[in-house]
Image (cartoon, helix red, strand yellow):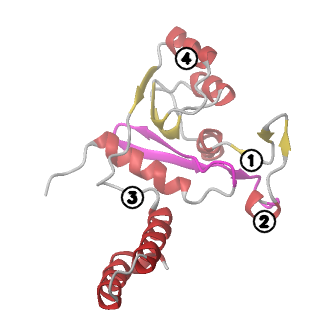
Amino acid sequence: MERISWDQYFMAQSHLLALRSTCNRLAVGATIVRDKRIIAGGYNGSVSGSVHCVDEGCYVIDGHCVRTIHAEMNALLQCAKFGVPTDGAEIYVTHFPCLHCSKSIIQSGIKAVYYAEDYKNHPYAVELFEEAGVHVEKVELEYLQVDTNPKEKVLFIAKLLNHLERAGISEEEIHDLRKEADHLFTTLE
């Protein structure tokens, strides 16, 4: 078996963290790494002890959910809270950081930003990263390493099987296909 690269390993961790997100608009995860060791992780969610978007909906002002703290900030604040230095560290984020998070990343001394998906990449954030000498690189999570949308696949398979059933495929064939799909996706139900 071939081992995954360090970049894939840390990006997978960020995608795993994103599964804890409590914001309905976008699930984001961030992992801070120093010397190939994870020193902090965060996901976008509400202030500890406060109401979450998943419970009461997003609190949107000027097109932004103000209820959530971004994943990058949560990871940086975790370092601050526990006295873990970030100078010279790297951050792996599921989405390109917003302008505010970009500025905080620079101020924290992080030397590299790896992200999986473009997301409203602000030109000024890109400029600031270049000016500060922060290495920025897109590292997409490889599909075969970690499945980041299994529930959508389950829904698609169910829809596809329903279409096949309506198209007149034999009951026995549909039964076998459903059985195979159930076997593939049993851990998600």
Q: Position of residue 63 (x, y in %)?
A: 80, 36
Give how far apart the Cα atoms at labels 1 and 4 are.
23 Å
Which of the two marks, 3 or 4, is nearer to us in this view? Answer: 3
Separation (CA) of disc 3 from disc 1 = 25 Å
| Amino acid under disc 1 | Thr
Q: Which residues are magenta?
A: 23-51
Tell whether label 4 touches label 1 (CB within 8 Å).
no
Residue flagged by tag 4: what amino acid is it?
Val
User: Earlier along the polypeptide chain: callout 1 or callout 4?
Assistant: 1
Residue 124 position within the rendered picture, expressed as x and y whole percent measured from the top left: 63, 14
Helix, strand or loop status at disc 3: loop
Q: Earlier in the sequence, mark 3 or mark 1?
A: 1
Q: Which residue is mark 2?
A: 55
Q: Which mark is residue 68?
A: 1
Residue under numbered circle 3? 147
Q: Residue furthest front?
A: 168
